[in-house]
Image: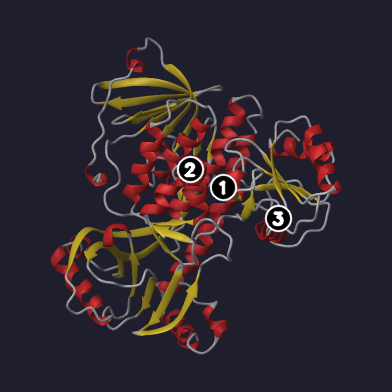
Amino acid sequence: MIDYQSLRFDYKRHADQDAPTPARHPVVVVGAGPVGLTLAIDLALRGIPVVLLDNDNTLSSGSRAICFAKRTLEVFDRLGCGDRMVDKGVSWHVGRVFFHDEQVYSFDLLPEPGHERPAFINLQQYYVEGYLVERAAALPLIDLRWNNKVTGIEQNDDSAVLTVETPEGDYRLQAGYVAACDGSRSNLRQMLGLEAKGRTFRDRFLIADITMDAQLPTERRFWFDPSFHPGQSVLLHKQADGMWRVDFQLGWDADPVEERKPENITPRVRALLDSIGFEGVQFTIGWASVYTFACQRMERFRHGRVLFAGDSAHGVSPFGARGANSGVQDADNLAWKLAAVLRGEAPDALLDSYASEREFAADENIRNSTRATDFITPKSEVSRLFRDAVLELTKRHAFARTLVNSGRLSVPAVLRDSPLNTPDTDTFQGAMVPGAAAADAPVVRADGSSGWLLRECHLAQFTALVFGQGEAAERSLQALMACDFPLHVVRVKAATSEGELATQRYDALPGTVYLLRPDQHVCARWRQPTAANIRAAIDRALAKG
């Protein structure tokens, strides 16, 4: 078995370092974390050559981001590595909330039946990065350069020129576009004189990876003010390889250096295990870190030829698993747009919609993350009294449970106000509005075999879902063929139980058509489209209309 935490990747000299003038590349991605790797793989699968630069030669240390949401797994499926993530990760859907030492309620995040992927998996970030690196290595259009640190950038009308530091000296690269995926301390952001603004929380948290032989259910457990850690909160999650993540709230006055020492972590973990009936269980401490956090974002995610994604653009508290998941969705949004612009299929203005859509999503994540943090870490006696009263009420009253916030978990943003959407002219019910990420459902393929709706969507093209059979469906198919644009068409027939579920989810009638962008977001829908309707919607989704 590969030890992904100990991997070291070789620096290799590249011919670009000896070029008399800076070599030009369509896209340079800076930062080989989950976001940069996702973006590079997505671009390569769309036929776009990518240079991916990383200032280090290792994967992340410690588990870090561990909670990967259903939407992120669907993105990984499209990139060809979702199965590995799910097979290795720990799938879960039940959460339990405790006040003092008493369970006050539990919740179930399992989507309704008929989804291929679980609500969440827990998987250490180094596995996610390792699997993505291996996927990238299989794609010849990705040029991944380790120990290549960007130290300078200049922009002009048609490119950006990067200065890159290596063990053998500096060289320069010219890029049509630069994607800054270089994390919360983004060098590119600093070099461009930009900043992320928001709210910093005056609190400290200890996170520790522990390995133990304890047969606990695979659940998320969250304690408010337990006897084993009075006045603070604790979170317990299971990960792959029999490892557990424990988060202890420490308070602002805690000494980060002292709290990271094993002799200070051990009694905290011992008290937790003893309280849940595992007095004799032995454990070992792996990685540990003490952190503070801020909810903040850059004012704009696009600056000329440079586009910011992931933690370089926005940051949230860890409650709710919104960091890595939102970063992967940034990459998912950006890749198809960059590819369309570079292939001449869309104007440069399409990239402005990346910024506006993902700025909206960042605001939503920050809003939810801030609310969670305020509930978990009340900053006044009045807010603490309110929180504790709510927690007491949850034992007997369901309405109070909606007020509890131990980290509302990541869901994809519904881009309702995107300029790329075509407004409805027909009446529809349900959640699949223009701007929503397409919901999965079982389907029957043309050959009669069973499959999944999102798997049937095209990797890189717009997809049209055509529902039902009969004359109305045939008219819709003819309109799609006449629109003079290369669309991938998926037939969804309601003659089976699988087709019925998809039909319900999309509130479809025979002939109903949903147009999906290459990132699987709905951009238009009709009961009975015309070729002109379809072509106008595609042009609008490509920022041409």
* Mark identifier at residue 212: none
Sooner in the amino-acid sequence: mark 2 or mark 3: 2
Q: Amino acid at mark 2?
A: Ala
Density class for disc 1 (Cα within 10 Å; few <14, some 14-19, many ≥20) is many
Q: Quadrant of residue 446?
A: top right
Q: Which residue is mark 1?
A: 358
Q: How is the image coloured?
A: secondary structure
Residue 456 placed where, x, y %?
61, 44
Assign a secondary structure to mark 2: loop
As measured in the structure, the alpha-carbon distance from the residue carrying label 1 to the one carrying label 2 is 9 Å
- Residue sitting at 30 percent across and 26 percent down? 165
Instruction: State whether residue 183 is above or below residue 501.
Output: above
Residue 240: give x, y in percent of width and height: 32, 58
- The residue identified by callout 2 is 309
Q: Determine whether label 1 and label 2 are within 8 Å by CB.
A: yes
Q: Amino acid at mark 1?
A: Arg
Q: CA distance from mark 1 to mark 3?
A: 18 Å
Q: Which residue is mark 3?
A: 433
Q: Nearer the viewer, mark 1 or mark 3?
A: 3
Q: Quadrant of residue 192?
A: top left
Does residue 42 sit above or below 344 in this rendering?
below
Decide: few, some or many residues near mark 3? Use Cα within 10 Å; few <14, some 14-19, many ≥20.
Answer: many
Q: Is residue 31 visible?
A: no
Marker count (numbered) = 3
**Relative to residue 494, is residue 442 drawn left or right?**
left
Task: Using a 10 Å C-alpha cutoff, classify the residue at mark 2 as few (fewer than 14 neighbours), some (14 to 19) or many (20 or more).
Answer: many
Residue occupying the far left of the picture: 263
